[in-house]
Amino acid sequence: DAMVIQNPRYQVTQFGKPVTLSCSQTLNHNVMYWYQQKSSQAPKLLFHYYDKDFNNEADTPDNFQSRRPNTSFCFLDIRSPGLGDAAMYLCATSMGLAGVNEQYFGPGTRLTVT
Amino acid sequence: SQQGEEDPQALSIQEGENATMNCSYKTSINNLQWYRQNSGRGLVHLILIRSNEREKHSGRLRVTLDTSKKSSSLLITASRAADTASYFCATDLYGNNRLAFGKGNQVVVIP
């Protein structure tokens, strides 16, 4: 089945130690998104890629970076995680941006910062 | 960025009853979407309603949109225990798929 896969499902990192979260998709979608969802809060869009074009949300901290080496994979890099970065990180995809495009979400990676 | 706001935030009902939750937003939108999230999992798209639509149905789901009041409601009829989840509305201001999610309604359906 076509799907969005996130690895690992649970990640523990130390304060200030760089960490990378991974997302892959078999849907062949053009757009990949990263959301941050803190406990009992709404998902918040961090950035997205349309193909190779990167689009950062204005309020996304510089500590968060992303890479998309090919259509299937997208990575979220947190350069110096703080305690406040502990959250569920959700990857999503959609066919396109224009018009109406349903987003397909992965199961998420829960990040703990110690 | 704009966010939808759901009301109420927690709902507990008996299996078979209907569940209604509301969402309000602040500015004009292109479309509004509802998503479900089971505990500790990703979101699943439920239904999308465009700004020129007033009501949509999908199975046991009914969504309404009132652009004059900037509000939407999601009705789940004949609820089942498997409907236990958090439900989020998300607004798309420009039709470019950059979604702003509301805080979510937690629904518990008691068997």
Image: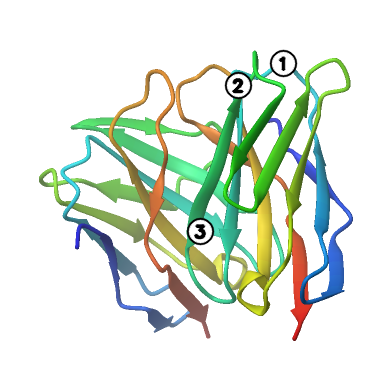
Bin the neighbour count of mark 3 within 10 Å (Cα to Cα): few under 14, some 14-19, many 20 and up.
many
Left or right, B71 with reference to A5: right
Mark 1, residue position: B28
Q: Which residue is mark 3?
A: B43
Determine the chain carrying the residue at label 3. B
Left or right position of B108 against A63? right
Q: Residue at x 45, y 45 (%)?
A: A62
Q: Is residue A98 left or right of residue A15?
A: left
Q: What element does badge 1 sit on? A: loop
Q: Please report contact status of discs 2 and 3: CB closer than 8 Å, yes or no.
A: no
In 3D space, how far apart are the residues under numbered discs 1 and 3 (Cα atoms)?
24 Å
The relative height of residue A109 versus residue A59 in the rendered view (above or below) is below
On the question of residue B92 being in view, the answer is no
Answer whether labels 1 and 3 touch (C-beta < 8 Å).
no
Q: Quadrant of residue B15?
A: bottom right
Q: Residue at x 75, y 27 (%)?
A: B65
* Quadrant in the picture for residue B69: top right
User: Residue at position x 50%, y 31% from top?
Assistant: B98
CB atoms at circles 2 and 1 under 8 Å apart? Answer: yes
> In the rendered structure, which amino acid carries the disc numbered 1?
Ser
Q: Which residue is mark 2?
A: B93
From the top left corner, tell me how far across and down residue B5 is, in percent.
Answer: 80, 43
Q: Earlier in the sequence, mark 1 or mark 3?
A: 1
Residue B30 visible to an observer of this rendering: yes
Camera-nearest residue between A64 and B26: B26
Which element is circle 3 on? Answer: strand
Residue A3 in percent (x, y) is at: 25, 59
Q: CA distance from mark 2 to mark 3?
A: 20 Å
Query: How much space separates mark 2 and mark 1, taking CA atoms?
Result: 7 Å
Which mark is on residue B50? none
- Rate crowding at label 1 as few (under 14), some (14 to 19) or many (20 or more) other CA atoms within 10 Å: some
Tell if the residue under mark 2 belongs to the same chain as the one under mark 1.
yes
